[in-house]
């Protein structure tokens, strides 16, 4: 296939620009009309008319380009770039403003007009066009390359900006599970912080071990822990992208930088959590498919780490090593014996990795001090098959979303497989396809477990392996049966789609909501919490923080002994995994009114329709199986933190029906 000329690229670019702009203007107009803003603001009326005129003009320009006007449009662009180049170094501050304009506007009062995806995309696209023209004027490079650089240059500051609001000293949790992470990380320093020997965390051991680093500095404030978490979430994908660029032996700082930026955004599509991406980084650093013993040692050690991380990541190191082997090592014959000998190294790596990972997990379970049954909750949780498809909890649905995100990669692989019989032994193609299919199916299965299915993070392993196969092929590192490198070119339209997908994903991502109350209300809530806790402790009672437990960790609530049991993340997991032994024990504690005071996020008070409400099944399971266990023995005394936190005190007469 012949490469597209500048004229063809321009024609298709004009179509995309006109279409995205038209959809953006439509979404903007619908929003201001629906909210009634256009009726009271003359400026919005003018903006609405101007936007539609502009959209019509772009449609006309696209039609003009396809009708033979591309040469003249290219001339206009060259003239514009030439005039901009006269600004010289003054282009630098202008480009800096364009780089920062996207997050600045979205996080300002004007951001309300960009909440609709298509409007946000249109705004992003215009910033990319403006920055591209400036880069072409300043660097005198082809505009397609500068367009990619512009898109990445705007997307990454925005990615960083989504974390900035979360770095603060607000004393309460910013979202449902945020401060739970800090409490669980603090248990590695249990004696110093709580004066107790606590059980080891029962999930994501490596996540909390990494997240515990700021606790090495005694009395480090809450904002330091938030900064550390934000740095991990932002930087780890890009560091992994850089290691992949090194492994691919890419030449030139520009290419390495662009690839690193793009790969970092790609990893965030899952996202691949920062403790799990360590597995990927270590494989990139130490696995060499042509060195059996070195790879075996690396796979065993990395798999042991994965076993302390997450059960579905136990096979990842072995599978990554196997993928690299099948891509780089030819089969030394067509007979069955040669095939068996060929398959032996990857089989040993995968088996050894599984053994090491599960052994580490079992050792962790045995020595942690936790009940063994809580480690296997993933196997007994409810499965919500409807989350594969569009639903209130995830508008796209897991299956359409992963197919959309990976579509350019799949199309490229199908193109690369044309004439594969003359290049590769069938066993190599089948092995790679089987690994990808297994991780795809496994990721879908884990995604439908209750509590999940709201993004693609359970398909993280599949996304990593797919990327490895594609970049190895694209950069000519796959060997045919004659040990010659095979490189499959990617058409411009497909390369554009592959490069654009992670960028579109990140500009659609708006970050996690970080709701806060006013400083005065915050101070008042803290004082009330302290007063309730002081009274309960003074009367000799125990205080159970089911949620907001980090208040004890950071000394925001003082002189209250920690009760480690029944932290909300663990309690929720036990409910959703139907761990009846745990729930029976919890029910007996509630019925006996063991605690003088309980603080918890508001418990579900009614049933929600799964067809209409996000996370309705999670609500309904807790409402049915947990709420009654508390309400039969306790009653709500107070509501705090914008009525999101309930204060429970014992009922005068419990009405619990507990079998002894």
Image (cartoon, grey):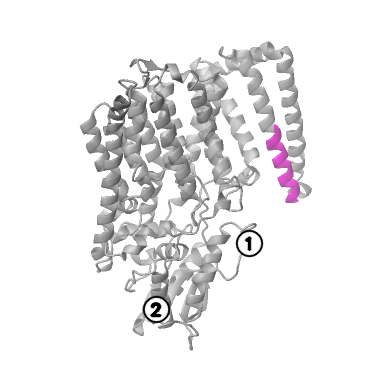
For label 1, the residue is 609
Q: Which region shows up in magenta?
A: 22-36
| Residue at x 64% of width, y 43% of height | 116
| Residue at x 42% of width, y 65% of height | 574
Asked if the magenta segment contains residue 163, the reply would be no
> Which residue is most to the bottom?
653
Residue 2: x and y, percent? 56, 12
> Which residue is most to the front?
336
Q: Quadrant of the C terminus?
A: bottom left
Asked if the magenta segment contains residue 24, the reply would be yes
For label 2, the residue is 589
- Per the picture, the main secondary structure of the magenta-coloured stretch is helix
| Residue at x 23% of width, y 28% of height | 291
Residue 130: x and y, percent? 59, 26
**Mark 1 packing: few (<14 Cα in 10 Å), some, or many (20+)?**
few
Helix or strand or loop: what does disc 1 sit on? loop
Helix or strand or loop: what does disc 2 sit on? helix
Q: Is there any visible trace of residue 94 in the rendered image? A: no
Judge whether 587 appears above or below 504 on screen: below
Give the quadrant of residue 613. Answer: bottom right
Judge whether 216 appears above or below 259 on screen: below
Residue 588: x and y, percent? 40, 79
> What is the spatial separation of the Cα atoms under label 2 and label 1, in whole angstroms?
31 Å
Judge whether 190 appears above or below 304 on screen: below
Residue 340: x and y, percent? 30, 30
Locate residue 599 relative to residue 284 in the image: left or right.
right
């Amino acid at each position: 296939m012949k490469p597209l000329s500048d004229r063809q690229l321009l024609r298709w670019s004009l179509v995309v620009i006109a279409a995205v702009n038209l959809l953006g203007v439509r979404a903007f107009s619908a929003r201001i009309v629906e909210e009634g803003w256009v009726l009271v603001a003359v400026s919005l009326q003018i903006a609405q008319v101007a936007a539609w005129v502009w959209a019509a003009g772009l449609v006309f320009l696209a039609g003009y380009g396809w009708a033979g006007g591309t040469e003249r449009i290219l001339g206009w662009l060259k003239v514009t770039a030439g005039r901009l180049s006269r600004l010289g170094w003054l282009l630098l501050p202008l480009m800096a403003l364009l780089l920062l304009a996207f997050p600045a506007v979205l996080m300002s009062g004007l951001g309300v007009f960009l909440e609709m995806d298509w409007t946000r995309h249109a705004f992003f696209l215009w910033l990319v066009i403006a920055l591209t023209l400036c880069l072409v004027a300043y660097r005198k490079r082809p505009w397609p390359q500068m367009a990619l650089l512009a898109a990445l240059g705007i997307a990454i500051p925005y990615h960083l900006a989504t974390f900035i609001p979360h770095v603060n000293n607000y004393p309460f949790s910013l979202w449902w599970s945020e401060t739970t992470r800090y409490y669980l990380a603090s248990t590695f320093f249990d004696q110093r912080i709580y004066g107790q020997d606590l059980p080891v965390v029962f999930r994501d051991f490596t996540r909390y071990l990494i997240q515990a680093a700021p606790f090495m500095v005694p009395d480090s404030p809450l904002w330091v822990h938030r900064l550390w978490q934000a740095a991990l979430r932002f930087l780890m994908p890009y560091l992994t992208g850089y290691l992949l660029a090194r492994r691919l032996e890419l030449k030139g700082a520009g290419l390495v930088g662009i690839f690193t930026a793009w790969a970092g955004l790609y990893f965030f599509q899952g996202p691949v959590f920062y403790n799990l991406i360590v597995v990927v980084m270590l494989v990139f650093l130490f696995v060499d498919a042509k060195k059996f013993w070195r790879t075996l040692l690396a796979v065993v050690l990395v798999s042991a780490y994965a076993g302390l991380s997450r059960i579905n990541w136990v096979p990842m190191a072995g599978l990554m090593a196997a993928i690299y082997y099948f891509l780089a090592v030819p089969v030394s014959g067509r007979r069955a014996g040669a095939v068996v000998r060929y398959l032996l190294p990857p089989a040993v790596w995968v088996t050894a990795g599984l053994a090491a990972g599960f052994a580490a997990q079992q050792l962790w379970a045995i020595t942690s001090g936790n009940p063994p049954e809580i480690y296997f909750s993933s196997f007994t949780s409810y499965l919500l098959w409807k989350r594969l498809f569009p639903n209130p909890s995830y508008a796209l649905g897991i299956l359409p979303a992963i197919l959309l995100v990976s579509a350019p990669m799949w199309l490229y692989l199908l193109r690369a497989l044309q004439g594969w019989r003359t290049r590769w032994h069938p066993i190599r193609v089948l092995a790679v396809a089987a690994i990808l299919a297994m991780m795809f199916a496994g990721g879908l299965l884990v995604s439908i477990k209750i509590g999940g299915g709201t993004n693609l993070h359970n398909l993280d392993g599949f996304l990593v392996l797919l990327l490895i196969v594609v970049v190895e092929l694209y950069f000519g590192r796959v060997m045919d049966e004659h040990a010659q490198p095979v490189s499959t070119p990617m058409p411009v339209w497909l390369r554009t789609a592959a490069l654009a997908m992670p960028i579109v994903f990140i500009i659609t991502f708006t970050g996690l909501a970080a709701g806060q109350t006013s400083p005065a209300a915050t101070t008042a809530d803290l004082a009330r919490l302290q007063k309730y806790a002081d009274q309960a402790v003074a009367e000799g009672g125990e205080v159970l923080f089911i949620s907001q437990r980090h208040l004890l960790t950071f000394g925001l609530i003082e002189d209250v002994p920690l009760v480690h049991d029944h932290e909300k993340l663990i309690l929720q997991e036990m409910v959703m995994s139907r761990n009846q032994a745990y729930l029976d024990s919890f029910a007996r504690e509630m019925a006996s009114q063991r605690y003088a005071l309980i603080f918890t996020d508001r418990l579900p008070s009614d049933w929600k329709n799964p067809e209409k409400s996000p996370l309705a099944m999670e609500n309904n399971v807790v409402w049915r199986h947990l709420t009654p266990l508390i309400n039969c023995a306790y009653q709500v005394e107070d509501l705090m933190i914008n009525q999101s936190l309930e204060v429970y005190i014992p009922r005068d007469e419990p009405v619990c029906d507990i079998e002894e």
